[in-house]
Amino acid sequence: MKHSLPSDSPAASRPLRVLHFVSGGFSGATQVAIDLCGEFPGQETLLVLRRRASIDPTERVAALRAKGLQVEVVPRWAHIVTILALARLCRQWKPDVLVAHGFSEHLWGRYAGLLAGVPQLIHVEHNVRERYRLGRLRQSLWLAQRTACIVGVSQAVRDELVRLGHPAERCVAILNGIDLSRFPPGLPWAQREDAIVMPARFAQQKDHATLIRATALLAQQGLRPTVYLAGEGKASWRGKAQALARELGVDAQVRFLGHVADLPALLARVKLCVLSTHYEGLGLGLIEGMASGCCGIGSDVEGVREVLTHGETGFLVPHADAQALAQTLHAALRDHAGTARIAAAGQAHARATFDRQRMRQQYLDLFMRVGKGQAALTP
């Protein structure tokens, strides 16, 4: 591993060292952690990915290192192995702050930080509903007493953490952001494809089924837009979605794209971006679509309500209601002028509110405060 200074150098004589620990998958938590790594004034970062059994990290790690990031990988086949490997990296690199992203990585990351004697720990929660069974909730609450700050990626996430018993005085909200330079405004509305894109991984949390059922209802009304499902995730959930599309006779128009390397190009040429979901921390895929000029349509659930205002910057649809989603899609595809106006307002809102630079600066300020032992006030 590359060290910028000898291990015995005093912390005061070098930049603040911040280690980010996160899953090695293609999740929103992983992307946020990546966005917070790199060269920043007064700070040095190390990204540590927890290996996913289904994903070979070699290519991704090489790409991140080619961008100048310091990256390491730890195993995941047993929690204790993960903890010990991360603790060993901490002893070598000597971070001042360890930032543990996402469930359940925030547990194993903070255990490793405590074991290695990392001065300050930060927990970042990326979802509003996590699998907090009694045992893991007790662990999280115990760790919270030893954690400088707990960040929710939306106000809904922060409120849920407090509801579960995490100390309110240590819980803050920092809204997620996206790299706007990656998502240009896109094609003019009239040149866009009358199609739908849902950028989301296949998982229990996501509600691809309701969108597929809504697509079948649209077909009964003579509307057959192409539906692009962009995302990987679990093969079992993807298989269920594919089976449903075949059963409903819409498999010819529903395209299962898997991971889309050039997602911005897809969002730039499609009119509607849908996030059909059961819950969210903050719907990054929807934000990316809106920033690219798509009209945003999302389930009326936590973490989506903070992204758009119904009828002004996008449309909210009752949760898991295929009929209501079909009606909203029908109206959006038919009312070209009205949908274009909503899309433009949504784009302006997304680009003004969810800029990665704003998010990054709030986190960097937080790391500096925590690293200096100051209170982690709400940014």
Image (tube, grey):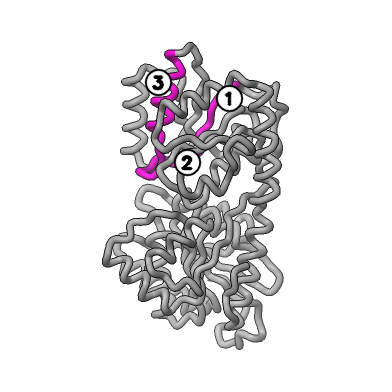
Residue 332 - label: 1
Residue 155, how many percent across, how many down?
53, 58
- The residue located at (42%, 38%) in the rendering is 319
- The residue located at (37%, 61%) in the rendering is 104
Q: Nearer the viewer, residue 36 or 336?
A: 336
Residue 53, how many percent across, how many down?
35, 52
Question: What amino acid is at disc 1?
Answer: Ala
Residue 265 on the magenta segment: no
Q: Which one is earlier in the sequence, the residue at label 2 or at label 3?
A: 3
Q: Secondary structure at mark 2?
A: loop
Question: What amino acid is at disc 3?
Answer: Asp
Q: Secondary structure at mark 3?
A: loop
Residue 103, how many percent across, how many down?
40, 60
- Identify residue for label 2: 300
Give the tally of numbered discs: 3
Residue 258 position (above or below residue 149): above
Which portion, as a residue range, is magenta? 194-220
Disc 1 to disc 3, C-alpha distance: 22 Å
Left or right of 182, for residue 113? left
Residue 251 - label: 3
Q: Which one is earlier in the sequence, the residue at label 1 or at label 3?
A: 3
Q: Nearer the viewer, residue 278 or 159?
A: 159
Binning the other alpha carbons within 10 Å of mark 3 as few (below 14), some (14 to 19) or many (20 upward) gives: some
Task: Please identify the quarter of the rendering in which residue 366 is found.
Answer: bottom right
Left or right of 208, for residue 99? right
Left or right of 306, for residue 211? left
User: Which residue is situated farthest in the top direction here?
Assistant: 222
Question: What amino acid is at disc 2?
Answer: Asp
Disc 2 to disc 3, C-alpha distance: 26 Å
